[in-house]
Image: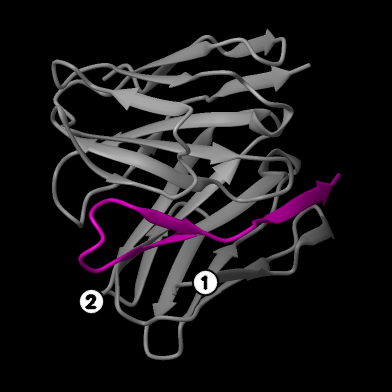
C-alpha cells in the first residue's frame, strides 16, 4: 500500500529565506509526483508535475526534485515571500492506478515579513 | 480554459437530508475525479470517471454516496441521509486521459452537517 509522508507538518521562516519541503513515499512504482499549494479554505493549485523518468522540474522560484529509488521528493522555494504562506501538498500517482493520487498530509508554511 | 468549477461552494444541511454537488471540469478533459478532504488532512480519493464510465470507487464511498457523469461532461456527487461524519470539503478535479497529465482541482464544496 502506497503511503506518502510530508515532514515537517508546519514550518515558519522569515521572509527572504530559502527553504526545502520534504515528501517521501513507500512504493517506488510511481507514474509521477505532483506538488500542490492550498490556501486556507480553498482548492488545490498545481505547482509542478515530475514524471517518474525526470529528476527535477522548475517553475520560477520553485524547484522540485524526485529520487524514485529512495522514495523522496523535495520542493525548494527560493527567496520566500509572505505570499508563499500556504499548505503545500505532494501527491503520487501510481502505475496502473488510473488517475488516483495518493496525498501526503501537507506542510503548512508561514513566511513572516 | 475556465478551470474546474464546483457548486455550491458551501452547504449546511441537517443530518438525514440529501445533498448534491456539481462539478464542471475543464472543457475537453475526459477524466474527472472526486476527492474528500477533512481538516488538517490531505485529500482522499473517492471515485473517477473516464468520459461517462465510472472506472474506480474507493471503499470510502459508502452506499449513501453516488456519483454520475451522464454525458461525459459535468458530474454530480450525491450524499443521501447525511451524517455528521460526512462534514468535509469535497473536491473535484479533471485531466486529460494519460498518466503523464497534470490533474487540476476546483475550489471545493464545503459540507457541514448539523
The boundaries of the magenta stretch are A91-113
Give the labeled residue for mark 1. Answer: A3
Residue B5 point in image, percent of width and height: 40, 17
**Dot 2: within a 10 Å radius of its alpha carbon, few (fewer than 14), some, or many (20 or more) residues?**
few
**Dot 1: within a 10 Å radius of its alpha carbon, few (fewer than 14), some, or many (20 or more) residues?**
few
B59 in relation to B76, above or below: below
- Residue at 72% in and 44% down: A85
Give the labeled residue for mark 2. Answer: A53
Q: Describe the element under mark 1 as helix, strand or loop.
A: loop
- Quadrant, the N terminus of chain B: top left
A17 in relation to B109, above or below: below
Residue placed most toward the observer, B106 or A83: B106
Q: Residue furthest bottom?
A: A69
Q: CA distance from mark 2 to mark 1?
A: 20 Å
| Mark 1 chain | A
Do tags 2 and 1 sit on the same chain? yes
- Residue at 49% in and 46% down: B60
> Would residue A96 be counted in the magenta stretch?
yes
Residue A16 point in image, percent of width and height: 75, 56
Amino acid at each position: 500500500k502506497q503511503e506518502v509522508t510530508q515532514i515537517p507538518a508546519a514550518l515558519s521562516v522569515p521572509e527572504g529565506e530559502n527553504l526545502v519541503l520534504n515528501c517521501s513515499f513507500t512504493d517506488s512504482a510511481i507514474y509521477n509526483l505532483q506538488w500542490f499549494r492550498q490556501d486556507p479554505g480553498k482548492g488545490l493549485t498545481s505547482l509542478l508535475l515530475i514524471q517518474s523518468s525526470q529528476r527535477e522540474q522548475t517553475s520560477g522560484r520553485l524547484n522540485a526534485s524526485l529520487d524514485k529509488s529512495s522514495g523522496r521528493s523535495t520542493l525548494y522555494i527560493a527567496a520566500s515571500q509572505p505570499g508563499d504562506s500556504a499548505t503545500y501538498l505532494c501527491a503520487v500517482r501510481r502505475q496502473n492506478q488510473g488517475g488516483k493520487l495518493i496525498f501526503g498530509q501537507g506542510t503548512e508554511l508561514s513566511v513572516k515579513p | 480554459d475556465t478551470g474546474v468549477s464546483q457548486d455550491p461552494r458551501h452547504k449546511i444541511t441537517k443530518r438525514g437530508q440529501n445533498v448534491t454537488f456539481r462539478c464542471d471540469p475543464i472543457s475537453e478533459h475526459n477524466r474527472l475525479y472526486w476527492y474528500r478532504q477533512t481538516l488538517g488532512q490531505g485529500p482522499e480519493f473517492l471515485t473517477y470517471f473516464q468520459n461517462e464510465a465510472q472506472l474506480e470507487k474507493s471503499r470510502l464511498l459508502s452506499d449513501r454516496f453516488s456519483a454520475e457523469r451522464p454525458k461525459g461532461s459535468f458530474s454530480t456527487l450525491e450524499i443521501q441521509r447525511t451524517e455528521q461524519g460526512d462534514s468535509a470539503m469535497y473536491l473535484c478535479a479533471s485531466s486529460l486521459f494519460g498518466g503523464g497529465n497534470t490533474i487540476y482541482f476546483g475550489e471545493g464544496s464545503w459540507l457541514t452537517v448539523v
